[in-house]
């Protein structure tokens, strides 16, 4: 007979009834008689008593084992569903990163096309390279740290080409392990914010200093920029919210994202433990 859900349910209900039947009989007998207690299997032959008792023990063990099995199955199903939900959420967050960045860049290119066609064409080529990385490499679970550095350098070059003002941009790297990997498009959000809220609003003396280091234990990324306090926007974009949630999903309890602001200087720091990568 096939173990359908209906058959399993019938077996469980029948087993529970059989286990509770002696208790029910004892309760009824105590209730309608002057007895203070009931002795099970009283008057039964020893063989019959042992057989019935063994059957009840076996049935009890089977039901308890089945209950534990179903509980474990439920926990596993819940974990699988939770993992799938996190994957779907992560994919959704990932899909927001690229449009968020490219939307801002296309807006900047729109005004440049009429002013400087040659520079606009060069920017479009650079932007196409970045889009290629975002579409293909950006959809992977992880990329080599050197690929992410190249993407950040392209971003910096792209901004350097489009500005008509002098900007102090420094990008220092200290890579002790070139085989290190990182989830793509994490650092770009912090770098983009430095340009958007710092360089964009500073008519002169703007600077962006970037430091990326990889050790055997962690990946460290920091961006320091100055800003015009009078022009600082209080509007909260989706970039940082997206980054925080992605870090929670990908590096739970293995990352530290911090922000410091002193007068007109802002510093964002991200530390990621490499324990997941090595395990």
Image: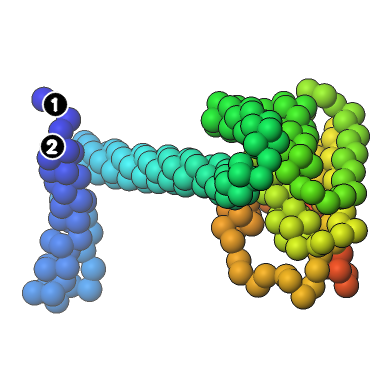
Res. 56 image quadrant: top left
- Residue 51, horizontal then vertical, whole percent: 22, 37
Which type of secondary structure does the marked residue at label 1 adopt? Answer: loop
- Distance between the alpha carbons at the discs numbered 2 and 1: 8 Å
The circle on residue 259 is none
- Residue 100, horizontal then vertical, whole percent: 56, 49
Residue 241 to residue 144: above or below: below
The residue carrying mark 1 is 2
110 to the left or right of 43: right
Instruction: For the C terminus, give its image quadrant.
Output: top right
Q: Residue at x 70, y 56 (%)?
A: 196
The circle on residue 7 is 2
Res. 265 image quadrant: bottom right
| Depth check, front residue: 147 or 72 | 147
Q: Residue at x 13, y 26 (%)?
A: 2
Q: How many marks?
A: 2
Does the image show residue 35?
yes
Instruction: For the N terminus, give its image quadrant.
Output: top left
2 or 1: tag closer to the N-terminus: 1
Query: What is the crowding at mark 2: few (fewer than 14 residues within 10 Å), some, or many (at least 20)?
Result: few
- Residue 223, horizontal then vertical, whole percent: 82, 51
Marks 2 and 1 close (CB-CB < 8 Å): yes
- Residue 253, horizontal then vertical, whole percent: 68, 51
| Depth check, front residue: 190 or 10 | 190
Q: Residue at x 17, y 38 (%)?
A: 5
């Amino acid at each position: 007979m096939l173990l359908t859900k209906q058959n399993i349910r019938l077996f469980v209900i029948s087993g529970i009834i059989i286990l509770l039947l002696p208790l029910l009989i004892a309760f009824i007998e105590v209730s309608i008689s002057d007895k203070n207690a009931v002795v099970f299997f009283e008057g039964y032959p020893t063989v019959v008593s042992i057989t019935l008792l063994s059957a009840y023990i076996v049935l009890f063990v089977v039901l308890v084992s089945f209950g534990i099995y179903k509980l474990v199955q439920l926990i596993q199903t819940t974990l699988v569903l939770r993992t799938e939900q996190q994957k779907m959420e992560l994919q959704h967050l990932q899909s927001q990163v690229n449009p968020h960045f490219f939307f801002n860049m296309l807006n900047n290119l729109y005004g440049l096309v009429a002013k400087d066609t040659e520079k606009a064409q060069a920017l479009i080529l650079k932007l196409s390279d970045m889009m290629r990385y975002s579409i293909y490499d950006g959809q992977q679970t992880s990329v080599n740290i050197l690929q992410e550095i190249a993407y950040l350098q392209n971003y910096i070059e792209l901004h350097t080409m489009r500005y008509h003002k002098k900007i102090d941009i420094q990008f220092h790297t200290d890579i002790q392990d070139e085989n290190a990997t990182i989830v793509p498009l994490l650092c770009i959000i912090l770098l983009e914010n430095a340009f958007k809220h710092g360089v964009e609003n500073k008519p002169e003396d703007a600077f962006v200093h970037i430091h990326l280091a990889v050790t055997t234990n962690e990946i460290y990324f920091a961006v320091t920029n100055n800003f015009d306090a009078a022009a600082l926007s209080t509007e909260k974009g989706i970039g940082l919210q997206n980054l925080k949630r992605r870090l929670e999903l990908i590096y739970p309890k293995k990352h530290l994202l911090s922000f410091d602001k002193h007068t007109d200087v802002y510093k964002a720091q991200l530390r990621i433990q490499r324990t997941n990568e090595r395990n």
